[in-house]
Amino acid sequence: MSTAQTVPIYSDNYRFLREHIYSQAGIVFEDDKQYLFETRLSPIVRQLGLGSINDLCSLLKAGRETEVHRRVVEAMTTNETYFFRDPSQYDSIRSALLPRLREERRDTRRMRFWSAAASTGQEAYSLAMVLLEEGFGNWNLQILGTDFASKVVDRARSGKYQQIEVNRGLPASLLVKYFRRAGMEWQLSEEVRRLAQFETIDLRKSMRALGPFDLVFCRNVMIYFDSQTKDQILQELHSTLFRGGWLLLGGAETAIGVDRWFERQTIGAATVYVAK
Ligand SMILES: C[S@@+](CC[C@H](N)C(=O)[O-])C[C@H]1O[C@@H](n2cnc3c(N)ncnc32)[C@H](O)[C@@H]1O
């Protein structure tokens, strides 16, 4: 009997799937990534009681199952993240951005931050812990976390993490201070959670209305887009920042075209993009 594992994806269906994911999320897959589709879509094929990914494509082409469309696109997103990823960027926030804002905003005591492509929330919550540790607990702080995939946004909102997740990047002192055990998981304290709100947002949509922000993280997501999409997103991100506000990209990402809207600065070991 054929199973989802044994039936290869027909080439016209592979083309259909790539085009579908590109139109729904802007994510580009190269010609040779069939194995990724097989690994990530097989659980959906099994749950729906279908014989293969080709059957799933027939269902998608019929166009009625909007919930299945959403699950397929979300399954194809890469949600890898962890606490204090790229530590040098948090160092630059502590050493340069926060001292400046502490001075500039001493009257309003208000700061706004955005973790675009927040995944399961570790980036937003790492920043929240930095703000508390730096003594901004009685300021008016807002951290917006957004992601395309509702499954990760729901997890971010819950503020619950597994042992393996708190073992990645989170200093033990912060685990003890801001988390408590909840069965097999760790629950982030209300003090940290109240600083961050999470929404489902597609980065390809207009984002001007979300700002203005003092800092935007847009890390490890542009790598999945083509240059036209990247360019459009960079321009939109710029429109959400205060002049002088910071954009932080992933450690290994180089943003071609970024110089039109941002000035590149090196702070310690981090590269920050300052809005012109
Ligand atoms: C690899 S994670 C990066 C998480 C975090 N920024 C970090 O660097 O650790 C990439 C995230 O981008 C999200 N994503 C992909 N396409 C998107 C889009 N068009 N709009 C918004 N988010 C998107 C995915 O759902 C995924 O959670």
Image (spheres, helix red, strand yellow):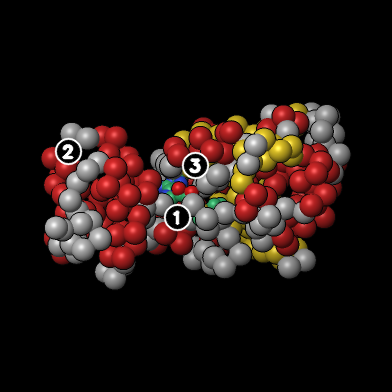
Q: Position of residue 200 (x, y in %)?
A: 46, 36
Q: CA distance from mark 2 to mark 1?
A: 24 Å
Residue 77 is left or right of residue 164, and the answer is: left
Q: Work out whether mark 2 precedes mark 3 in sequence or the reverse, and give the earlier one.
A: 2
Can you identify the residue that label 3 sits on?
A: 152
Residue at 25% across / 41% down in the picture? 48
Crowd around label 2: few <14 · some 14–19 · many ≥20 (10 Å): few
Whether disc 1's CB lies below 8 Å from ligand 1 is answered yes
Query: Is there CB contact under 8 Å for labels 2 and 3?
Result: no
Disc number at residue 99? Answer: none
Residue at 77% across / 54% down in the picture? 171
Can you identify the residue that label 2 sits on?
A: 63
Mark 1: which amino acid? Thr
Mark 2: which amino acid? Gly
Residue 55 is left or right of residue 35, and the answer is: left
Q: Position of residue 247 (x, y in %)?
A: 62, 52
Above or below, comparing residue 266 to residue 146 in the picture: below
Residue at 17% across / 51% down in the picture? 51
Mark 3: which amino acid? Val
Residue 197: which quarter of the image?
Answer: top right
Whether residue 98 is visible here, answered yes or no, is no
Q: CA distance from mark 1 to mark 3?
A: 11 Å
Q: Work out whether mark 1 precedes mark 3 in sequence or the reverse, and give the earlier one.
A: 1
Can you identify the residue that label 1 sits on?
A: 78
Taking depth in this image into account, of 10 and 208 the one nearest to the observer is 10
Crowd around label 1: few <14 · some 14–19 · many ≥20 (10 Å): few
Whether disc 3's CB lies below 8 Å from ligand 1 is answered yes
Residue 249: which quarter of the image?
Answer: bottom right
Above or below, comparing residue 272 to residue 99 in the picture: below
Say what secondary structure mark 3 lies in: helix
Whether residue 97 is visible here, answered yes or no, is yes
